[in-house]
Each structure stands twice: as structure tokens, then as C-alpha cells.
Image (cartoon, rainbow, N blue to C red):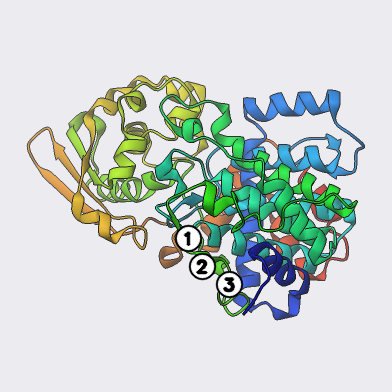
Amino acid sequence: MNRMTISQQWAEFAVNLRFEDLPPESVAAAKMFLFDGFGCALGGSKTADFQILEGTFREIGGPGECSVIGSDLKTDVRSASLINGLAIRALDYNDVYWKQDPSHPSDLLPAAFSVGERQRAGGKELLTAIVLAYEFEMRLMEAAFPGIRELGLHHASLTAFASPFVAGRMLNLNAEQMANAAGISGSHNITLGAVTAGTLTMMKNTVDPMATESGVFAALIAQKGFRGPAPIFEGREGLFEAIGKAWKPEVLTENLGKTYKIIDCSIKPFPSEALTHAPISAVLDLVVEHDLRPEHIEKIEIFTLKRAAEILADEKKYVIDSRETADHSLPYCIAAAVVRRHLTPHEFSPESLKNEEILAVVPKVRAVLEPSFEERFPAEQPCKVVITGSDGTVYRRKRAYPKGDPRDQLSTAELKQKFAVLAEGILDRPRCETVYDAVQNLEAADDIGELMSLLTK
């Protein structure tokens, strides 16, 4: 019988995993998500919340050892992991994995690349840490029954348990130090679901980066000998006992290293909450196919999951008062897609949020609970869209999952276009291509510092 705690088993796996052990498809996925994460960070560096943190760290940040994406700021590794994490998350455009709980595994990327830049790590080490990040984060999203989101908690609570292993790998911690880091970070990072309930604020996109920052700090002090509780998952008053109704601990450890979760993660095609994506995809299909104009639409009914209706279509989501509310508002996202025939960060600009043509469509959108969809989730994210024209014509479209799902992936051209749009005003097109090529050849890099320098001003 294995007497090691879960954190000790994870630590042993993280310490011993070699780049050469990784299947080619997992390495390819790590490159894809890193490139996408860099693009999201470039776009996020233009937001007000990023600029607040950037200004703060110019005042209080430590030694300039790490790059800040989209900026000329160099700062300490802990600060860099937070601000780069916020940049990735700020537009709600980074990747998504939704099982028992939802998550955005690329939130953990700074624990790999910021720490890696400090350590002058090579590309193989970075890619290995990224695969680990996705493995641990995605397993955590499968382990609670029901998910902790159903208990009023945010998934950043779980990210804090994964991030120490990523940072620890980049710091070359031994297994004991890594398990201590998990105990340090996991024991003080319970995040309330209030950050995604009702009227949304800048904290919606900041709690995940804070959970990553916590893991970086925990790994740094564990390296110096600081200790944390080893049975942080299954021990007395640990995660399983303190939070949730039922856990399946075996989900966290079985078949580690036999398959890798990273290939099951989705890239977002739209900068909005994940459960808006299938409806947006279906609406765009109909609008383009039938050349539907906003003024000729009487109503739009979105038959969807209970959780989607509750999160994305409550009464506050019809009052578009911020970008954070808009990208979690099904009525706004659908309205903007109908009017603009696409949904990019431009549709969440201050000007777009006040656009009268878009706002006129918002009240026409209604979410309808479809009980039969519940049993299909989370394997699918089903929706049915019914658009009624002003002449009485009815248009229908069903979607089992959105564009960007592993079953309907973005093409390389679509991924590059997403990156280029996000990088506008910071990187020109040739430099975007240089970044793509550098990521695709990352295993040949001896020092990832050169890659990071491509992403700064």
C-alpha cells in the first residue's frame, strides 16, 4: 500500500518527469497553449487592471530579474508571476477546462516562464513544467463531487494547490521541498465565489494569478527550508475534509505519466466566459448563413445549462457596466456577435459597451433552461439557439461543444490571427511570426530569456 501523501506522490512525479518522457502530442499542445497564453497576455497588458498593477510594481517591485509581457518593466519573480498572470487572464480569453469545476490552466504559465527566466532555464524544462501544470490543474478540476463552484467557492482555491509544483520544478526543488511548498500554498488560499457572482470587478481576473503567485512564493521559501503540512489534501482538516461534500482522491494520482491531460484542454475562440462559447458559435453560424440583421430579429432564445443561465443571464447581466460584466453576460456576448458578426476584444472596449446598436439587441436575448442538457455536461457543453425574425421566420441551430474544443480545434491560421489581434499596438506582424517560430522550436533553446525578451516593449 502506498503510504505517501498525495502531495508527496505529485512531488515525486514532478521531480522525476523528463522531457524525453513526454508524447509528441503533449509537447505540441504545450507549445500551442504557451503561444496562446503569450497572446492573451499581450492583449491583457492594455487593460486598466494590468496598468494598475504595473504602476504599483514600478513603485514596490524587487530586483529586475523577470520580464513583464507587453511592458518595459523588469521586476522580481514573485511580482512578475502575478502581473503576467493577470495579463493572461485579464481579457477572459485564455484557455479553459471544465469538468466538475472550471479552470484556465494557462493561469499557471507564469509559474513556469517567470521562474524559468529567473533560473535561465532551457526550453525543454519550460515545456515539461507546462505539461505538469496542466496535468495537476486539470486533475483537480475532476476530483470534487460536486465541484467546489457549487459550494460558493472559486476554482482559484484549487489552483493554489497546483502552482507550487510548477514553480518547484523550475526551481529544481527536491520532492520534500515541493511537498512542503504545496502545504504552504494550499493552506491559505480559499477564494470565494463572490468574485464571479452578480456585478463583476477586477478581482474576477486576479484571483487566479494570485493563486499562481502564492505557489511561486511557497516554492521560494520551501527552497530555503520553510515547511508546510504534507497531508494538505487528505489530512485532518485538509482540503478533502474542510471543503466539499465528496472527493475522489484517486482522480489525482491514478495513471500519472501514462496519459497526459493537456491534450484535452480547449483554446478560447472568444474573449468571454466559457459557457457562452457554444451559443456564440451557433448564433454566428445562423447570422452568417442567413444574413440576419439585428433590426430584423425579434428575439433570440438560448436553451442552455442551468449553471450557464445562473452565471451568465441573471438580471445583473443585462446591465452592462463594465468589461468584466460584459464578458460574463450571455445577452451582451450574443448581441455583440449578432451586430459585429464576430467577437473579439474590440467588442469589449469602452466604446463598444456603450454602442446603441449592440445594447438594443441585449433585451432580445433570453436564456432558457433545458433540463435534458444536464446529463450531457461536462462531456459536452450543449446548447440550442432559436432566432425568431421580425417576419416570423424561425432559425434553429444546435451545438454540442464550441469552436476551440479539442474536437473542433482552432487551426494554426486561426491561432496566429488571434495572437496578432491581441498583439496589436505592441508587436508588429513579423515579430508575431518570430514569437511563433521561437515557441515552435522551444526545445532547442538553452535560455528562455531570449524568448521572453520578444514579448516586451
- Write the residue at 35% across / 58% down: 401
How crowded pointer 1 is (Cα within 10 Å; few <14, some 14-19, many 20+) is rated as: many
In this view of the protein, can residue 436 be seen by the observer? yes
Secondary structure beneath label 2:
helix
Left or right: 415 as drawn, with respect to 115: left
- The secondary element bearing badge 1 is classed as loop
Nearest to N terminus: mark 1 or mark 3: 1
Front-most of residues 154 and 151: 151
Left or right: where does residue 213 sit relative to residue 259?
right
Location of the N terminus by quadrant is bottom right
Report the residue marked by disc 3: 260
Image quadrant in which you'd find residue 125: bottom right
Between discs 1 and 2, the one toward the N terminus: 1
Residue type, label 2: Val
Residue 251: image tag: 2
Q: Give amino acid for label 3.
A: Tyr
Q: Position of residue 388 (x, y in %)?
A: 14, 39
Apparent side of residue 14 relative to residue 340 in the rendered image (left or right): right
Q: Quadrant of residue 308?
A: top left
Separation (CA) of disc 1 from disc 2: 7 Å
Instruction: Give amino acid for label 1.
Output: Glu
Q: Which residue is mark 1?
A: 142
The earlier-in-sequence mark between 3 and 2 is 2
Asked which secondary structure carries label 3, the reply is loop
Q: Are marks 1 and 2 in contact (CB under 8 Å)?
A: yes
Is 273 left or right of 359, judged from the image as shown?
Answer: right
- Residue 397 vs residue 190, the one in the foreground: 190
Q: Nearer the viewer, mark 3 or mark 2?
A: 2
Q: Is residue 428 visible?
A: no
